Amino acid sequence: MKNIFFIIVVTGFFLSSNAQEFDKEHWLNEVQRHARMHKAGQVHYPGDESIDVTYYKLDLTISYQNQTIQGSVTINLTSEVPALTGFFIDLKNSFTVDSVMLGSVPLSFTHTGAKINIITDRPYVVGEELSVKIYYKGTPSSSGFGSFAFGTHNGQPAIWTLSQPYGASDWWPCKDTPGDKADSSDVWVTIQSDLKVVSNGILTDVINNGNGTKTHKWKNHYPIAQYLISLAIAGYAEYEQFYHYSPTDSMPVIHYIYPENLNTLIPQLNKTVPMLHIFAERFGEYPFILEKYGHAEFGWGGGMEHQTVSSMGSFGDGIIAHELAHQWFGDMITCKDWHNIWLNEGFATYSEALYFEAVNGTAGYYQRINNLMNAARNAVGSIYVHDISDVWNIFNYNRTYAKAAIVLHMLRGIVGDSTFFNVLRTYAWHPSVSYGVAVTEDFQAIAESVTGLDFGCFFQQWIYGVNYPRYNVIWGYNSLGNNLFEINVSVNQLINSNPPFFTMPVQLKVNYPGGDTTITVFNNQQNQQFSFVIDKQPTQLIFDPGSFILKELVITPDSDNVNHLLSYKLEQNYPNPFNPGTTIKYSIGYPDHVEIKIFDVLGNEITTLVDEYKAAGPHSVDFDMSSLNLSSGVYFYKLRSGNFSKMRKMVLMR
């Protein structure tokens, strides 16, 4: 029955070509019903487990001058226990709670230990609904990355929120856990008239109160985690575009930018709509298509993927792509707990590489992947975050972002492009997680259902294990006669802690005159030998030619082998001495970014000869000094690729 529901919903959603065919109200009802269906599987996590929140309404008055908030938050919830007589809501003690109302009935409560403990008017059975309204006031506190800020831009007022991971209750009462999404939300904010309020969903009304204030009303129709409810407030300039997701339908893309920065940022903002098309093609349609996407400039140095409107402190290609990808992975599907934050950050970080692949091809993809691999090698501990008490431990870049992204790169290498993107699309729209929450095992189960493969070992070692394989590979060949050659490869891994060694499929590419052959072996032992026969005399073995595996590699030819393995090499330039030109030959062992620079004897950089992605194997580059006006003497040329670096000397003689 679930599979039928999934097929009907997704097909109906993607194939709708006009407003008459696409019943928006029905779609939203199905999205919210679907989100409620899988709340039963929530992880036990901070927040009162005896209640299930279904709706939030924030109705706040904010004073920039006094730096205060006052107002009310309405919370609709249902009982998760047989006889609910009390529950708690998270709110920092910097606020005063004036009252808690159930309709016109005041409820008894206490506010201690950053919790509002509320006594209900009677016992509530499982599934029974109630709606409470909490009146409160005070000055918000700020934790984590700065959960609530009264700031400035260009000397003018600016207010912003960034509640991840534990900061929502720094400024409004909520169940402060990502495992319990509300089905929908409203945010109403009253503030001085010269400021604009930006929040999630659609702006339904702006009311001039006639007293120097305006009330902005934002409506979000989709399930939302508490930390994704946001405010960005300033005297914004607006720049509006449209994402045409069908021949007859479009969605607004609205950028709220500090006026002094708008003209400079427009070229970067213009990349957003093409990015929407790129990601929709790979992940399925933008998940909040009935509302909007956009950016709200704020005073923090990075970005935050607030649902339907990312808060942005910078606007590089990578960060725009990262926060947009979060709308699928982080906002539509949210990690159930911060232990599994890689499902948010790893997916968004990997999506940066997908964007660069779309606009710059394979070279753009591998340039980003190689940078991520370099960072991932510095990761300490497992991608699964055991200690979630430290915000910086949760959001450790090397582990949570870079290494987690490389896990997806490795998965792509195992299953191939077509199947990999099928896995991503199926995961994004699977009824067990879409518009809901997920843990690693949810993604693993969906990947296994799509591919028919068992990924238990893969996820156990890469998500719950530590480090990465360190390979020592020796290879050689024997002539069997009749132009047949037996290739022998010995793969040895250094001992690791957890797992003791890594089990991975590995591609081996054998080059020979006029061509190459690639086979895949399954390395499931610490020390393992492989043999296979080809009908060409080999000249080179490349281990993991696609650079799919996060690893360190030492590869050497068998001492009895009369041929020589091409690995990393920088040869002496020829001619040398030279005037005016010379040729530099080099080889790299596997696809990677290559940099060759020329220096004088004092270490001053003269010029860059190579700065690009190169395929594995031999290469050469010519250096002509005619236009550089160099004097006779000694110069140096340096090759850097991955972890390999070598420098040689050359002589210019005029």
Image: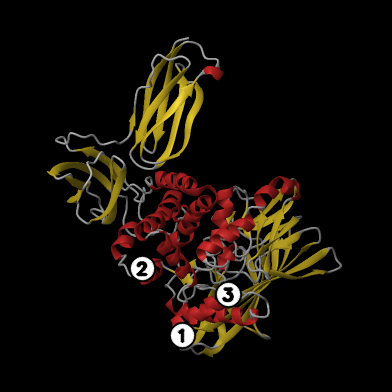
- Residue under pointer 3: 15
Which picture quadrant has residue 448?
A: bottom left
- Residue under pointer 2: 451
- Tell me if mark 1 has few (under 14), some (14-19) or many (20+) residues whose alpha carbon lies within 10 angstroms of its own: some
- Tell me if mark 3 has few (under 14), some (14-19) or many (20+) residues whose alpha carbon lies within 10 angstroms of its own: few
Percent x, y for residue 366?
44, 46
Of the residues under marks 2 and 1, which one precedes in the sequence? 1
Q: Nearer the viewer, residue 322 or 75?
A: 322
- Which is closer to the viewer, label 2 or label 3? 3
Which picture quadrant has residue 160?
A: bottom right
Mark 3 secondary-structure assignment: helix
Q: Which residue lies furthest to the front in this view?
A: 482
Tell me how far mark 3 sits from mark 1, CA to CA.
41 Å
Quadrant into which the N terminus falls: bottom left
Q: How many labels does the image show?
A: 3
- Which is closer to the viewer, label 2 or label 1? 2
Q: Which of 121 and 486 is in front in this view?
A: 486
Mark 2 secondary-structure assignment: helix
Tell me how far mark 2 sits from mark 1, CA to CA.
39 Å
- CB within 8 Å, label 2 to label 1: no
- Residue under pointer 1: 81
Of the residues under marks 2 and 3, which one precedes in the sequence? 3
Residue at 51% from the left image edge and 64% from the top image edge:
283
Tell me how far mark 2 sits from mark 3, CA to CA.
25 Å
Residue 166 visible in the current orientation = no
Percent x, y for residue 355?
53, 53
User: In the rendered view, does 355 fall on the left or right side of 202?
Assistant: left
Three-letter code for the amino acid on which mark 2 is drawn:
Thr
- Tell me if mark 2 has few (under 14), some (14-19) or many (20+) residues whose alpha carbon lies within 10 angstroms of its own: some
